[in-house]
Image (tube, rainbow, N blue to C red):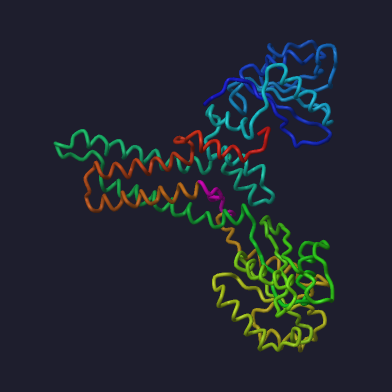
């Protein structure tokens, strides 16, 4: 699958900017660069040292396209493991395209999505989980997702899996050896030590699998539904959280007809806030569709914010008892989801009113979305729902669904092996499950892979990476 041709792509975002970087990789990358580059110091790119920068011009025959800096990286000491050049030119889209077209005419072809990183993997510069971390790093939009991607890209996850695989492989070799001496009925693998290893592997796999819950949240953001009756300040609360006029605010009940979503980073974690249509009985067809969507969003959310107007001790004429019944209903329908009860317009309450509300609803958080009072308290409360202990302790956290699936399958096989050891199952049957466990470990790091799998993974990369 390893290609020897030279590929080219824009490595920086498309569009005009101060500078742009055009990347070329392949056996002939430096040769091709030398044909279009004229150094201001008459340097020959074919003779310069690796990892050096050179100032000059890109020329197309007698025509000068731009003054540029060329970085030269000689394989195997480059990102891709191949000869690589990176041309830093001025960020005009016209200049970018002229240089790329010149390189295409000079012997390059356009790179496929993720092909530079694919070549890095095929040339042994990265394993598969590290390569996937490159895409996660590019997509990271908060501190937590960046930290996890960096840890994985440095090989933290790979090293943990590789160590387990190596230890299991050593025992597997002894089990396989027993098969060659089946008639002598000998045991080369110490079953007591093997049990200890299987217990340790099972423990590590379970920890990694459990980490996917927090990892998935960190990668995709925590969905938070803002629910309540119409005109209690849900849109105002969304605007206060985001500190911008994201949702339309009106005194007219039922203004929000559809779910409005936006994302906010709190303490390095992403939260996706969903402002939903107010829940009430209505004859309005459009509003009723919006209310139906509200219940769908509650199902999808991991945290529910229930907001009501506390300024009169009731909401839309409802008594506190009716609000308590509504809250109990939500708790019963979603017992595993954190429910935050918010009494809005607290700036209009007297101290005595606040005491009455907190006694009637002990876990209530009083705030004023309009005045932005209590917003920081709410943000801190939301952050407390996220178990960031593993992140703070720099533990390995799984964010990739493919890795999660492979770990689950590996755990199933390890548990089969543990059962086989306990039941003194013959070595030939045990060896089958061990091989399968090793296979699933290898799937993660790319020691076992297929063209189809690699195609699916790298198709999601951006061009130029």
Q: Position of residue 102 (x, y in %)?
A: 76, 20
Kindly identify the residue that appears in the image at 56 percent across and 57 percent down. Answer: 214
Q: Position of residue 76 (x, y in %)?
A: 58, 22
Is 392 one of the magenta-colored residues?
yes
Front residue of 394 and 411: 411
- The stretch in magenta equals 391-402
Kindly identify the residue that appears in the image at 63 percent across and 20 percent down. Answer: 74
In this picture, residue 295 sits left or right of residue 191: right
Front residue of 186 and 120: 120
Kindly identify the residue that appears in the image at 32 percent across and 49 percent down. Answer: 196
Task: Please tell me whether residue 281 is drawn above or below residue 56 in the rendered image.
Answer: below
Front residue of 99 and 152: 99
In this picture, residue 111 sits left or right of residue 152: right
Q: Quadrant of residue 84?
A: top right
Q: Report the label total.
A: 0
- Quadrant of the image for the C terminus? top right
């Amino acid at each position: 699958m390893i290609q020897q041709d030279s590929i080219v792509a824009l490595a920086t975002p498309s569009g005009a900017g101060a500078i742009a970087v055009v990347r070329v990789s392949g056996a002939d990358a430096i040769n091709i660069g030398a044909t279009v580059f004229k150094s201001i110091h008459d340097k020959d790119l074919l003779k310069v040292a690796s990892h050096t920068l050179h100032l000059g011009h890109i020329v197309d025959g007698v025509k000068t396209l731009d003054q540029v800096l060329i970085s030269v990286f000689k394989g195997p000491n480059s990102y891709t493991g191949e000869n690589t050049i990176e041309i830093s030119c001025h960020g005009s889209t016209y200049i970018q395209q002229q240089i790329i077209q010149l390189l295409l005419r000079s012997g390059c072809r356009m790179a496929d999505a993720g092909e530079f990183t694919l070549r890095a993997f095929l040339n042994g510069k990265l394993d598969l989980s590290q390569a996937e971390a490159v895409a996660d790093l590019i997509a990271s939009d908060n501190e937590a997702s960046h930290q996890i991607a960096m840890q994985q890209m440095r090989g933290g996850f790979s090293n943990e899996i590789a160590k387990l695989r190596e230890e299991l492989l050593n025992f597997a070799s002894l089990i396989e050896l027993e098969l060659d001496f089946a008639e002598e009925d000998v045991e080369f693998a110490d079953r007591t030590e093997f049990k200890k290893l299987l217990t340790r592997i099972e423990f590590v796999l379970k920890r990694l699998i459990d980490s996917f819950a927090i990892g998935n949240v960190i990668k995709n953001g925590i969905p938070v539904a803002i629910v309540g009756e119409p005109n209690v300040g849900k849109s105002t609360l969304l605007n206060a959280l985001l500190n911008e006029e994201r949702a339309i605010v009106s005194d007219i009940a039922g203004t929000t007809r559809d779910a409005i979503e936006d994302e906010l980073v709190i303490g390095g974690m992403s939260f996706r806030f969903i402002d939903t249509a107010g829940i009430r009985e209505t004859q309005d067809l459009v509003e009723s569709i919006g209310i139906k969507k509200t219940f769908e969003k509650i199902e999808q959310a991991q945290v529910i914010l229930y907001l009501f107007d506390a300024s009169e001790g009731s909401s839309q004429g409802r008594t506190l008892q009716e609000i308590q019944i509504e809250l109990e209903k939500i708790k019963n329908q979603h017992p595993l989801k954190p429910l935050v009860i918010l009494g809005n317009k607290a700036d209009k309450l007297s101290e005595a009113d606040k005491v009455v509300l907190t006694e009637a609803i002990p876990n209530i958080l009083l705030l004023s979305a309009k005045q932005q009072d209590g917003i920081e308290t709410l943000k801190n409360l939301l952050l407390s729902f996220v178990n960031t202990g593993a992140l703070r302790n720099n533990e390995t956290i799984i964010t990739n669904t493919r890795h999660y699936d492979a770990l689950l399958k590996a755990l199933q096989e390890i548990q089969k092996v543990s059962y086989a050891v306990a039941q003194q199952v013959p070595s030939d049957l045990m060896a089958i499950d061990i091989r399968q466990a090793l296979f699933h470990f290898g799937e993660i790091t790319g020691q076992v892979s297929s063209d189809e799998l690699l195609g699916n993974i790298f198709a999601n990369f951006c061009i130029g990476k």
